[in-house]
Image (spheres, grey):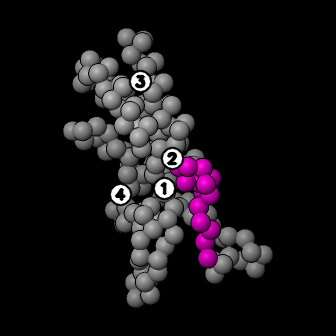
Amino acid sequence: MANFDELTEYLGTLLAQLSEAERRTLEMSIVRKLRASQRIRITKQQNPDGSQYVPRKTVLRDKKNKIKNKMFNVIKNAKYMRIDRTAQGTAIGFAGRVAFIARVHQYGLKDKISRFGPNVQYSRRELLGFTDEDINMIENDILNYISSK
């Protein structure tokens, strides 16, 4: 996260020179690219640091020991992975019940398997986060946008 703080400080003065409409256009193009990269990373079942997600329990495997469905196969779609524009900037997050499920996995919290089922400690699987490639992409996009103006 230190890299992201340095990036914010480094590019903050350049971004302050842009008009609100230009900043919004730039933010939306970057956020769309970030959402696409998050989706690809979730499909690969990887944490932002490049490590693989902790595998599912063997109960969810079929007779050939293959996983029936990959984790987070549905929530990575744009319907659930939302882009929200706030006063501070733009954010990517999850909506509704999916947000609760994503938070449990993101931080490795306890939750019930089913409505009346037992509490289970879930393994930490970071759904959203910045990779080094994401930070480089943000920096390059901002510099390209500013240099083209």
Mark 3 vs mark 4: in front: 3
Q: Which residue is mark 4?
A: 95
Residue 106 point in image, percent of width and height:
44, 61
Determine the CA span between mark 1 and mark 3: 25 Å
As helix, strand or loop, the secondary structure at mark 1 comes to loop
Q: Residue at x 59, y 66 (%)?
A: 54
- Which residue is rendered at x = 37% and y = 11% of the image? 149
Contact check, label 1 and label 4, Cβ < 8 Å: no
Q: 110 above or below 33?
A: below
**Distance from Cα at disc 1 to Cα at disc 4:** 14 Å
Sequence-first tag of 2 and 4: 2
Query: Over which residues does the magenta segment extend?
Result: 44-57
User: Looking at the rendered structure, which numbered label has been put on residue 38?
Assistant: 2
Residue 132 to residue 23: above or below: below
Please state which amino acid type lies under the numbered disc 4: Ala
Amino acid type indicated by mark 3:
Ile
Of the pair 149 and 108, the residue shown nearer to us: 108
Q: What residue would you read off at disc 3?
A: 142
Q: Residue at x 42, y 11 (%)?
A: 148
- Find residue 66 and report its horizontal and vertical position in percent: 72, 71
Q: Given the image, on which type of amino acid does mark 1 rest?
A: Leu
Mark positioned earlier in the residue sequence (3 or 2):
2
Q: Secondary structure at mark 2?
A: helix
Instruction: Name the dominant secondary structure of the magenta segment.
Output: loop
Label 3 element class:
helix
Evaluate if marks 2 and 4 touch, with contact meaning CB atoms under 8 Å apart: no
N-term-proximal mark, 1 vs 3: 1
